[in-house]
Image (spheres, rainbow, N blue to C red):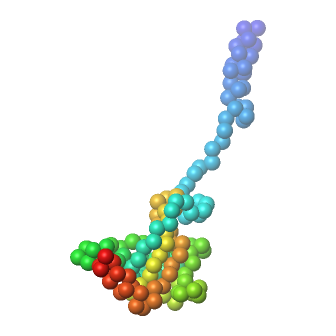
């Protein structure tokens, strides 16, 4: 009789631990490039193309001051990245190394930069913008 009482007590204590409704299963969260829509404000970068692959674009940024060093940033490319020259959409393969670009980007969930819009600047526009900033 004593064994039955101890067994009943143990079952009563251990059974609630096995009831699935008493705990919430949490799915692992991982920050990836496909972790939903882009979040945060988009920032515009200007510079020249250093490298361009199917997945990444490396841009030598235009320096803010004429004597400043050029910084290089790498941007992730996705299906949502739009490439435009003037008003016409273009393919990434149409962009040559050394081409001046204006690029809108935002940070993904894993804090890497993702390109949203890549706009090819007309040949004279890159020089005009930098001259306009120097005059101000």
Can you see residue 69? no
Residue ranking furthest to the top: 1
The answer to whether residue 79 of the structure is visible from this angle is: yes
The answer to which quarter of the image holds residue 100 is bottom left
Write the residue at 71% across / 26% down.
Answer: 16
| Vertical arrangement, residue 81 with respect to residue 25, above or below | below
- Say which of 15 and 21 sits in front: 21
Q: Residue shown at 50%/81% (left/top)?
A: 119
Q: Is residue 85 above or below residue 108?
A: below
Taking depth in this image into account, of 76 and 41 the one nearest to the observer is: 41
* Image position of 71 (left or right of 10): left
Residue 17 rendering spot, x and y as whole percentages = 67, 29
Q: Residue furthest front?
A: 136
Which residue: 32% across, 83% down? 131
Residue at the spot x=67%, y=35% of the render? Answer: 23
Total labels drawn: 0
Name the outermost residue toward the left. 67
17 or 75, which lies in front? 75
């Amino acid at each position: 009789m004593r064994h039955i009482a101890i067994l009943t007590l143990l079952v009563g204590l251990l059974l609630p631990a096995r009831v699935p409704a008493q705990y919430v299963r949490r799915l692992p969260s991982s920050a990836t490039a496909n972790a939903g829509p882009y979040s945060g404000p988009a920032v515009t970068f200007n510079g020249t193309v250093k490298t361009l692959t199917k997945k990444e674009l490396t841009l030598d940024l235009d320096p803010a001051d004429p004597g400043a060093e050029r910084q290089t940033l790498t941007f992730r490319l996705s299906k949502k990245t739009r490439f435009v020259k003037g008003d016409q959409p273009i393919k990434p393969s149409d962009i040559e190394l050394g081409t001046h670009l204006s690029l809108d980007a935002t940070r993904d969930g894993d804090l890497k930069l993702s390109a949203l819009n890549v706009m090819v600047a007309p040949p004279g526009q890159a020089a005009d913008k930098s001259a306009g900033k120097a005059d101000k």
